[in-house]
Amino acid sequence: MKRINRFQINFIAIILATALFTQSCKKANAAPETDSSKYVLADSLVRTLKFDSIQNCQMTNTITLTGKVSFNDDHVVKIYPMVSGVIQNIKVLLGDYVHKGQVLAVIKSSEMAGYGNDLVTAESNLRVAKKNLDATRDMFKSGLASQKELLSAEAASEQAQSELSRVKRVLHINGGNTNGDYIVRSPINGFVVEKMATNDMSIRTDNSTNLFTISDLKNVWIIANVYESNISMVHLNDVVDVTTLSYPGKVFKGKVDKMMNVLDPTNKVMKVRIVLPNPGYVLKPEMFANVKVTNEENHNALCVSSSAVIFDHSQNYILVYHSKADIKIIPVEVINTVGDRTYISGNIHTGDKVIASQAILIYDTLNN
C-alpha cells in the first residue's frame, strides 16, 4: 500500500506542475498582445484618418458684428413730382423690375397745360417777329425804314427765338407732353423699392414725399454696428464674411469699404459699410446680417486644424502622431480660433504631425 500511495502522490505532483507551467506560459504569451492592442492603431483605421501638421501662421483676429442689408445709395433714384396735379394710371407695383424710360404713372396737370400754351404763344410770337424783320429789311433797302428800326426788328426776332428755346427747355424738363399730361418715367434700370403714389392722389411740388424709389440691386450695402470696445479691431479693407437668416449655409465675401468714424448718439455704435455684389438679387434691403470681420496682426503663432483640438475636463489636447504605436496626448492652450484654424501654444513644435479626424475617438481609446 505504501508503494501505491507514494506512486500516486508522485503522479499527482507531476500533473499539477505541468498544469502550472502551461498556465504560466499562456499568461506570458498573452501579456504582450494585451499591451499591443491598447496602443497600436489598426492599419485599416490609419488609412481612414486625416492628418495635419503644426504650422507657424500669422495671427488673425475675428469679431462678429450685427447689421442689415441696405440700398447702395450710389444706385438709388427717388422720383419726386415736378408739377402739381392728379396721379392717374399707375402702371407698376412695389417690387416690379423696370427699365430706363419705362412709364411709371401719368399726372394730369394744369401746369403742363400751361407749358403747352406757352409753347404755342412763343412759336406764334417768333413767326410774327420774323415777318416783321423781313418787312423792315425790305423797307430799309428802299429807304423807307431807318437803321434804328431795322436793329429793333432784329432784336425782337432774337428775343422771340430765345423765348421759344426757353419754353421748349422747360417743357422738355417736364416730360415734353403738350396735352396737359406729365409722364413719370424711370430714369434707371432697377426695382421699385418704394411706392408712395396711388391713383387719383393729388400732389403738389412743395410736398417732400417722393412718388417712387428705384434701386439697382446688383450690389448692396451692409451697414454694420461696431461697439466702442471693438473699434480698434476693425479697419478699412478688412475681409468680412456675411451670413443671413434667409441663407444660413451661404457666406457672402466682402470687405470694409467705409468707416463712419463717429458714434451714433443714441446707441453709441460706429457704423461701417460693406459693399457686396448681389447676383440673383438674393440679398434684400432690410435683411438682418451677421458680419464676421477678420484682420491680421503683426505676430505669428502655431496653428493647426480646428478638428485636431480636443476639449476634455477644462483642458485642450492634441494627438501628436509618430507611428501607429506611438501617439502622444499633448495638452495645449488655445489662443484663438478663426474658421477651420486654431492658434495654440504648448509643448509642441512646427512640423509635428497631428491626427485631424476621429481624434476624440482615439483620445478616449488611449485614455481607457
Image (cartoon, grey):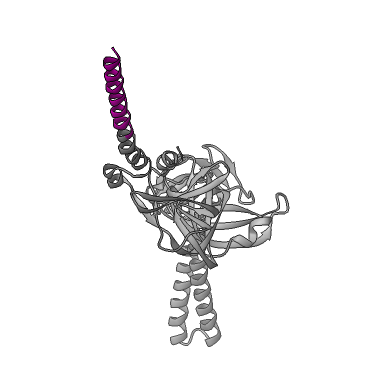
For the point 47% across and 85% down, the residue is 140
Work out whether residue 153 or residue 205 is closer to the camera in this orientation and state it: 205
Q: In the rendered structure, does residue 359 fall within the stretch colored magenta?
A: no
Q: Is residue 57 left or right of residue 227?
A: left
Q: Position of residue 1 (x, y in %)?
A: 28, 12
Q: Position of residue 295 (x, y in %)?
A: 53, 62
Q: Is residue 264 left or right of residue 100?
A: right
The majority secondary structure of the magenta stretch comes to helix
Work out whether residue 328 or residue 267 is closer to the camera in this orientation and state it: 328
Above or below residue 126? Residue 40 is above
Q: In the rendered structure, does residue 16 fall within the stretch colored magenta?
A: yes
Above or below residue 175? Residue 47 is above
Q: Position of residue 181 (x, y in %)?
A: 48, 48
Above or below residue 360? Residue 275 is below
Q: Quadrant for residue 260, please give it.
A: bottom right
Q: Quadrant for residue 277, please give it.
A: bottom left
For the point 43% across and 87% down, the residue is 141
Work out whether residue 12 or residue 66 is closer to the camera in this orientation and state it: 12
Which quadrant of the figure contains the C terminus? top left
